[in-house]
Amino acid sequence: MAANDVYVYDFAEGNKDMADLLGGKGANLAEMTNLGLPVPPGFTITTEACRAYLATGREPDGLAEQIDAHLAALEEARGKRLGDAADPLLVSVRSGARFSMPGMMETVLNVGLNDESVSGLAAQAGGDERFAWDSYRRLIQMFGKTVCEVPGEEFEHALEEAKRARDTHNDLDLGADDLRALVDSYKKIFTKHTGREFPQDAREQLNLAICAVFESWHAERAILYRRQERIPADLGTAVNVVAMVFGNLGPDSGTGVAFTRDPASGTQGIYGDYLANAQGEDVVAGIRNTIPLQELERLDKKSYDELLGIMSKLESHYRDLCDIEFTIEQGKLWMLQTRVGKRTAAAAFIIAGQLVDEGLIDLDEAVRRVNGAQLGQLMFPRFDLSDEPKALAKGVGASPGAAVGKAVFDAKRAVELAKEGEPVILVRRETNPDDLPGMIAAQGILTSRGGKTSHAAVVARGMGKTCVCGADTLEVDTRGKKFTVDGRVIAEGEVISIDGTTGSVYIGEVPVRPSAVVRYFEGEIESTEDALVKAVHRIMSHADGARRLRVRTNADTGEDAARARRFGAEGIGLCRTEHMFLGDRRELVERLILARTDGERQEALDALLPLQRADFLEIFQAMDGLPVTVRLIDPPLHEFLPPLEELAVSVAVAHERGEDVAKAEAMLAAVRRIHEQNPMLGLRGVRLGLVIPGLFAMQVRAIAQAAAECKRNGGNPCPEIMVPLVGAVQELETVRAEAERIIADAGAEDVSIGTMIEVPRAALTSGQIAEAAEFFSFGTNDLTQMAWGFSRDDVEGAFFWRYIELGIFGISPFESIDRDGVGRLVRIAVDEGRAARPDLKLGVCGEHGGDPESVHFFHEVGLDYVSCSPFRVPIARLEAGRAAI
Ligand code: ADP
Ligand code: MG
Ligand code: MG
């Protein structure tokens, strides 16, 4: 690395767009400095220096000199020197990566204090010994804990003991002598754990703290977090060195946090907490009770007014809700941090709308500021909390929804009760693959261990099931069939309610309210009826106007189709026909499969034809004027017959009893005949059509006749016939030749024929396949399954959590498209398909069609539409708009 690399930036030299180099905190401190806000002076050591340090294990050449130079400038600006016994400069050392990251090293305040400068600090504070010793003990505590890994509890115990000796719970009751004695105890704790004296050299303190921040990039928790959040591992963190200002200098000092508007509702106003005579983390640590920010007006009107002015300046500058940290030192306000603040899903929409009204952002920006995941959260039913039920416990909201049911503690019991029609919540310490049946049977899942990527969380999200995990105050006793929280026992059968969005757990049944956003999509309430719905309406309309991707739905019935249309679907991208063979029609299918002669088979098909025709007619009517892609039958036939074992047993039993078993035996023989080891790779899709005479023909005829009838009735049907599981163009050509004849016979017009691209070979030979297909629809479920060789029905619950833990993937590839692998197959098929047939229509009908990340990918590769379940249609619309803006 060249010796003239710049590793250190003064706050005055940076700005908010330099977060890659200066980290989020550093970039925003620089931005505030340049806005002329009262930020204590300081400098930022770059992420590049961190990367160099981590690569070589030592500080890069030139870094020490640059720190010295910037420190000298800081000393100059403050008129004090680091480590000076008589008049010391103190600094804080603060980590700050590009993305905020739990597990990274925390901040060390009051660096520069030692046995001598503590008196100098007291002198600066007008002889306030108490303040000086309080600051010193905080340094040893924070430095010990975060730089030298001394267990924090030891310091906390010592502090508790000092308070007990004074018979108080309030740290303000400790006097200078108490705190001086506490410093002694702290130093002993420090030496006991580190084998060395607490460093007295201020520059050494600073250096050790900086290196510790660098090294914390590799802390285990930080590594894990990055893997899970898919944050690159090589970014490194910046380090901010900031001149200290003191909120613990008496009653006219204090520290606080604030939001520029309510992060829960978006309402404008004063939201924050303030704590007088306190430093740094005291506000959030809950050491003493904070006061609402409004009360600061009474305590210190001047600082209060200045703060409000700054908050409004920050809002208009960042054009967004900001959160801030500030400190008041003897009546002088200092800004210590700001960033664009986190918010709830509802607030995200409302705030975006408000900012448009205020002229701070335009609608394009408003669409960018919200996302499909937030919209999805708003579409779940919610608990009605107007009676303010008290939460029994709080965990991580791992999979959204509001679930109510009887607590049960094992999977088997969950399945039993669910069979009796009882809603249940499965409660476990953590889940494992054995719990799967119980998870499926339950309304929701509650665990006391694990986070957003635990087995419970991953599986629940995959199933769209409500889940709260890591509620760590719960003591789950599976054997005793109960859990305990704060001494309260909840036994099996007691009703609980869990909120998968907020992570709250309640005793008893909390009433559930339908989502206002869904009611708006359903047309049950007007867009002007409430603030949230109004904002959603406005943002969705703009996204619809901007998007290039069309959004269709996966629907198999007229009812689903009609609902999806209300949600904004512009056609059906996948109409599965297999459900049309279930229920009382199963018998016809059995006859079809068991047929021994062509005549018997044709009879069964003839009986199915009018039924299918009626199904299609209903769907074409519901989607009048919009395209409807009908997929010919796809699953292996054994799915329509009883399971082999069950059948074998009942035949044996019947035989024993001397009953007539001829028919059952014939069935058993058929089931044996079509039994497959790997049915998903077996006789299904187009293979069925080619092997079972008349089956596809019957379906094509039903579609063509329904279309012709619909047209005769004055409708405008737009059917598209889709052939599943094609791997070779010859398969499609064979089906196509017959289908064209049938369509012509039925007198139907404008029926297009295309194929799914879901077998890797189809993607790889898409140029050939396009010659026989008017459209491609990517079946990304099967394509993922076959590209990875993962059996979708088996692997997700079995080991995906482990793969996520190991960082092999950040999210299940069935949840969000694997861009590098499966996505590559999609790209190949798009390019080669379009090259062969420029007007080839391209869409996707796998689960990924409604996944926000994946929608952006499909936009990028130039598909014409995505298709997803009705509920996800609005999410896809929004994300398609965001992708285009
Ligand atoms: P975090 O990212 O955990 O909030 P910070 O670096 O922001 O860590 O610092 C922790 C606390 O210390 C915050 O309350 C912050 O305002 C306070 N703090 C940091 N630097 C200073 C300073 N130079 N003077 C006074 N307080 C500070
Ligand atoms: Mg902070
Ligand atoms: Mg498929």
Image (tube, rainbow, N blue to C red):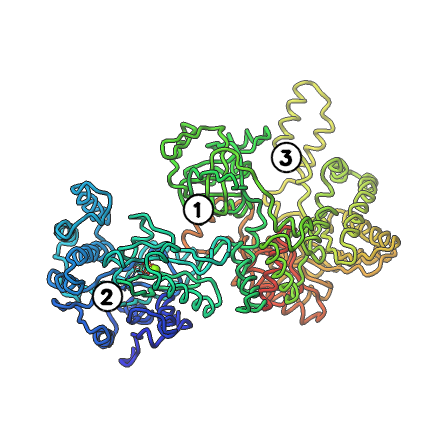
**Residue holding disc 1:** 396
Residue 758: name its quadrant.
bottom right
Question: What is the C-alpha distance between the residues marked 1 and 3?
Answer: 40 Å
Residue 643 is marked as 3
| Image side of residue 735 versus residue 310, left or right | right
The numbered mark, 2 or 1, whose residue comes first in the sequence reads 2
The image shows residue 750, relative to residue 566, as above or below, that is below
Q: Secondary structure at mark 2?
A: strand
Sequence-first disc among 1 and 3: 1
Res 91 label? 2
Which numbered disc, 2 or 3, marks the residue closer to the eye?
A: 2
Residue 479 sits above or below residue 85 on the image? above
**Separation of residues labelled 2 and 1 (CA atoms):** 36 Å
Residue 766 visible in image: no
The kind of residue on which mark 1 rests is Val
Label 3 within 8 A of ligand 3 by Cβ: no
Horizontally, residue 381 falls left or right of residue 609, namely left
| Residue located 72% across and 39% down the image | 582
- Label 2: how many residues lie within 10 Å, few (<14), some (14-19) or many (20+)? many
Of the two numbered discs 2 and 1 in the rendering, the one whose residue sits closer to the viewer = 2
Look at the image and tell me in which quarter the C terminus lies. Answer: bottom right
- Check mark 2 vs ligand 1: CB closer than 8 Å? yes or no: yes
Q: Nearer the viewer, mark 1 or mark 3?
A: 1
| Residue density around tag 1, few if under 14, some if 14–19, many if 20 or more, within 10 Å | many
Q: Amino acid at mark 3?
A: Pro
Secondary structure at numbered mark 1: strand
